[in-house]
C-alpha cells in the first residue's frame, strides 16, 4: 500500500509518498494521534468496502475520504499480484476522492506495479487523475476506466454485476480481479477486523451467502432463506452455548489472573512455610543458646556469690587477726614502757634488796622472749602493709599505662599532623627555591647580556673618540656617543644594583630555608621522641614471646587479675622465668602461675584490694 500526498492530523497534505508492505507482517508505530488506526482502516477499501461502513460520520468527525484525501493530487494506491508472475501479474488500484462529492471515492486500475512517475512529474509535483492517465499513456501502461464503488467491488472480487455494463465489467475483471474465482464476502470479513464495533448481522449474512453458494440456490427468494436441519431446541441450545462461550471468553482474562494469583499465593505460601521452618530452627537455636547463657550466668553468679562470701569470711578473719595483733602490740608496748620505767627507777634507787629481785630474773627473761616474738609478729604485719602499698602503686602504674595508650593515640594524630606540615613545608621550600633560582638565572642572563652590550659599546665609543678630531659634526657625534656611554654606564650600575638586590634576596631565602631546615629537624626530633615512646608502649602492649607479660596476656582474666597485684614489674620483661599456669595451691606458685621466682617470699594482696572491681584492675 502506498499513501500518495495523503492528509495528516495537521489538516494539510503530507507532500510525500509513504510505503507500507504488509507481507510477512508489518508494524505501524508512532505516538498517539499520528494515524496508526486510520492507516489500518484503509485496508478494507482495497476489497471494495465502503468508507461509511468503517467510520460513522458525525459528532464533528470528517468522513474518511475527506480527511485522508484532502486534494485531487492525494491518492491511496494498492499494489497486488493476481498471479504467479511478478512481471505480468502486478496491478495497481488507485483510490481518489471524487471532485463532485469529496465524501465518496472513485477508483481506477493500472496494468503495472507501482511506478513513481505515474503520480509525480519531473518537477516533483503530484499529479491528479488526469495527470496520472497522461503519465501512464506516455510510459505505455494500460489502465481501466474510472469506476464507482459498486463497479470496483464487482471487478476486484470477481462478482457478477446487475448493471448495463455487466459484460464490460466482466472483461475488466478478467485483467484486474484479485483472484480467479468470486469472493463475495471477503470485503465484509476484512472490514469486520478493523471496525470499531463488529456487526454480528454481517457475519450471519456472510455465513448465509456461503451456505447458499454451497447449496446452489438459484432464485433470490431461496437465497434469502436458510434451510436448517437442526430443530429449534438444538438451535436454542447452540445459541445458549455460544453466549456462554462469549461470557467465558470475556471472563477468561479474569480467570487467568485468578489462576496466576492462586499460583503466586501457593508459591508464596511455600516460601512462607520454608521461612517459617528456618525461623523456627533459628528460634530453637537462639532459645538453646539463651538457655546455655542463662545457665552459665546463673553458675557464674552462684560462684561469684560463694567467692564473695568466702572473701568476706577471710576478710573478717584477717580483720579480727589484725585487730588482735594491734591489741597485742599495744599491750606489749605498755609492758615494755612499764619495764623501762621500772629499770629507770631501779637505776635511780639504791641496790638494796636487789638480791631478792634476782629470783625473778628467769621470769623476766621469759617475758622478754615473748615481747620479742610479738615484735616479729608486728614486723610481719608491717610487711603486709608495705605489700598493700606496693599493690596500690602497681594499680597506679596500670592507670598510667591506660593514660599512655591515650597518649599513644594523640601521638599518632600529632605524627599525622607533623607529616602533613612537613610535606607542606617541603613543597613550599621546593617551590620557593625553584622560583628564586629561576628569577636569579633570568636576571643573571639579562645582566650578562647588558654587560656584554655595555662593554662593546664602550669599546666602540673609545675607538671613535680616539679617531675623531676634526669637524663640529664629528665632535657632536662624539658627544652623543659619550652621552650614550654615560647612559649605558648608568644602566650597568642599575644592573649591578639589581644583581646585589637579587643576591641579598637569595641570601635571605637561603636563611629562611636554613630556619625551615632547623624547624624540620626539630620536628623530626620530636617525632623521633614520640616514635620511641610509641615503640615502648607497643612493646608493652605486644610483649615478646617467652616473657612473663606474654604468658599473663595469653591466660583468661580470672587467672591473672589478682596475680597482677603482687608481681614486681621488673619481672614482666624477663624471658628466663618459663612461666606456666596451673600450679594450684603449690607454695612455689602464685595464683596458679609457676616460674623461677620465690613466690613464698612474695606477699599476697590485702582483702580490700581483692574487692576492687575487675574493670578497674590492670595487668
Image (cartoon, rainbow, N blue to C red):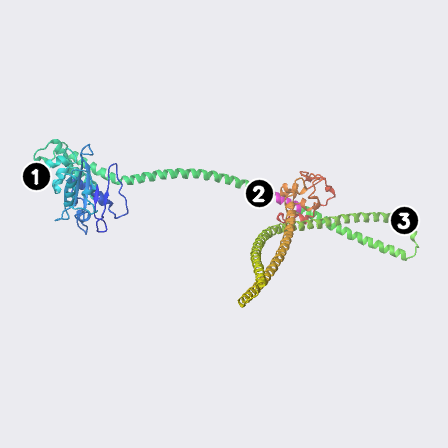
Disc 1 secondary structure class = loop
Say whether disc 3 or disc 2 marks the residue closer to the N-terminus.
2
Disc 1 to disc 3, how far (Cα)?
Answer: 183 Å
**How far across and how far down the image is residue 585, in percent?**
69, 39
Residue under pointer 2: 298
Of 255 and 364, which appears nearest the observer? 255
Which stretch did the figure color magenta?
A: 296-311
**Secondary structure of the magenta portion, mostly?**
helix
| Image quarter of the N terminus | top left
Q: Residues within 10 Å of mark 3 (few under 14, many from 20)?
A: few
Residue 51 - label: none
Mark linked to residue 165: 1
Q: Is residue 588 left or right of residue 197?
A: right
Residue 474 figure quarter:
bottom right
Residue at disc 3, secondary structure: helix
Determine whether, in the image, residue 157 is placed left or right of residue 313: left
* Residue 324 position in % (x across, y down): 74, 50
Percent from the top left, x then y, of residue 320? 71, 49
* Residue 321 in picture, x, y percent from top left: 73, 48
Residue 415 colored in magenta in the image: no
Q: Secondary structure at mark 2?
A: helix
Residue linked to disc 3: 359
Amino acid at each position: 500500500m502506498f499513501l500518495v500526498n495523503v492528509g495528516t492530523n495537521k489538516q494539510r497534505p503530507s507532500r510525500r509518498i509513504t510505503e507500507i508492505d504488509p507481507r510477512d507482517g508489518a508494524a505501524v508505530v508512532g505516538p498517539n494521534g499520528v494515524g496508526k488506526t486510520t492507516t489500518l482502516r484503509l485496508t478494507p477499501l482495497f476489497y471494495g468496502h465502503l468508507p461509511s461502513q468503517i467510520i460513522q460520520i458525525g459528532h464533528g468527525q470528517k468522513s474518511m475520504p475527506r480527511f485522508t484525501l484532502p486534494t485531487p493530487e492525494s491518492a491511496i494506491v494498492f499494489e497486488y499480484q493476481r498471479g504467479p508472475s511478478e512481471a505480468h501479474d502486478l496491478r495497481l488500484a488507485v483510490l481518489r476522492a471524487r471532485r463532485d462529492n469529496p465524501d465518496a471515492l472513485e477508483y481506477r486500475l493500472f496494468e503495472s506495479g507501482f511506478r513513481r512517475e505515474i503520480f509525480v512529474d519531473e518537477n516533483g509535483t503530484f499529479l491528479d487523475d488526469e495527470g496520472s492517465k497522461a503519465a501512464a499513456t506516455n510510459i505505455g501502461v494500460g489502465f481501466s476506466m474510472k469506476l464507482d464503488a459498486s463497479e470496483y467491488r464487482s471487478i476486484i472480487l470477481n462478482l457478477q454485476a446487475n448493471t448495463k455494463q455487466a459484460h464490460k465489467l466482466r472483461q475488466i475483471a478478467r485483467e484486474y480481479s484479485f483472484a480467479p474465482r468470486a469472493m463475495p464476502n471477503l470485503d465484509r470479513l476484512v472490514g469486520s477486523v478493523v471496525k470499531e464495533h463488529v456487526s454480528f448481522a454481517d457475519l450471519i449474512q456472510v455465513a448465509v451467502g456461503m451456505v447458499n453458494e454451497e447449496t446452489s440456490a438459484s432464485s433470490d427468494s431461496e437465497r434469502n432463506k436458510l434451510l436448517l436441519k437442526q430443530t429449534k431446541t438444538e438451535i436454542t441450545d447452540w445459541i445458549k452455548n455460544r453466549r456462554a462461550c462469549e461470557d467465558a471468553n470475556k471472563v477468561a482474562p479474569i480467570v487467568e489472573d485468578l489462576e496466576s494469583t492462586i499460583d503466586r499465593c501457593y508459591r508464596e505460601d511455600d516460601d512462607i512455610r520454608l521461612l517459617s521452618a528456618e525461623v523456627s530452627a533459628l528460634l530453637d537455636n537462639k532459645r538453646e543458646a539463651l538457655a546455655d547463657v542463662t545457665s552459665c550466668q546463673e553458675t557464674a553468679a552462684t560462684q561469684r556469690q560463694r567467692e564473695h562470701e568466702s572473701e568476706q569470711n577471710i576478710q573478717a578473719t584477717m580483720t579480727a587477726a589484725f585487730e588482735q595483733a594491734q591489741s597485742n602490740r599495744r599491750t606489749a608496748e605498755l609492758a615494755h614502757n612499764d619495764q623501762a620505767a621500772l629499770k629507770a627507777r631501779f637505776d635511780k634507787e639504791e641496790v638494796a634488796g636487789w638480791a631478792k629481785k634476782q629470783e625473778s630474773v628467769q621470769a623476766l627473761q621469759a617475758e622478754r622472749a615473748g615481747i620479742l616474738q610479738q615484735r616479729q609478729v608486728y614486723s610481719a604485719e608491717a610487711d603486709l602493709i608495705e605489700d598493700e602499698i606496693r599493690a596500690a602503686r602497681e594499680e597506679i602504674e596500670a592507670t598510667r599505662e591506660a593514660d599512655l595508650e591515650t597518649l599513644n593515640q594523640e601521638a599518632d594524630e600529632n605524627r599525622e599532623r607533623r607529616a602533613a606540615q612537613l610535606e607542606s613545608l617541603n613543597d613550599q621550600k621546593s617551590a620557593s627555591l625553584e622560583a628564586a633560582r629561576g628569577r636569579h638565572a633570568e636576571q643573571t642572563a639579562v645582566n650578562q647580556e647588558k654587560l656584554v652590550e655595555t662593554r662593546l659599546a664602550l669599546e666602540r665609543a673609545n675607538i671613535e673618540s680616539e679617531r675623531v678630531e676634526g669637524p663640529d659634526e664629528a665632535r657632536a657625534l662624539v658627544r652623543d656617543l659619550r652621552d650614550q656611554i654615560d647612559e649605558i654606564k648608568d644602566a650597568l650600575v642599575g644592573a649591578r644594583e639589581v644583581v646585589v638586590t637579587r643576591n641579598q634576596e637569595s641570601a635571605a631565602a637561603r636563611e629562611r630555608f636554613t630556619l625551615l631546615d632547623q624547624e624540620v629537624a626539630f620536628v623530626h626530633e620530636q617525632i623521633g621522641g614520640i616514635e620511641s615512646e610509641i615503640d615502648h608502649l607497643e612493646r608493652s602492649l605486644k610483649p615478646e614471646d617467652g616473657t612473663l607479660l606474654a604468658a599473663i596476656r595469653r591466660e583468661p582474666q580470672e587467672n591473672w587479675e589478682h596475680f597482677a597485684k603482687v608481681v614486681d614489674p621488673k619481672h614482666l620483661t624477663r624471658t628466663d622465668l618459663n612461666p606456666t599456669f596451673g600450679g594450684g595451691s603449690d607454695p612455689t606458685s602464685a595464683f596458679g602461675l609457676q616460674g623461677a621466682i620465690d613466690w613464698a617470699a612474695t606477699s599476697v594482696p590485702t582483702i580490700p584490694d581483692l574487692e576492687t572491681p575487675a574493670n578497674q584492675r590492670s595487668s
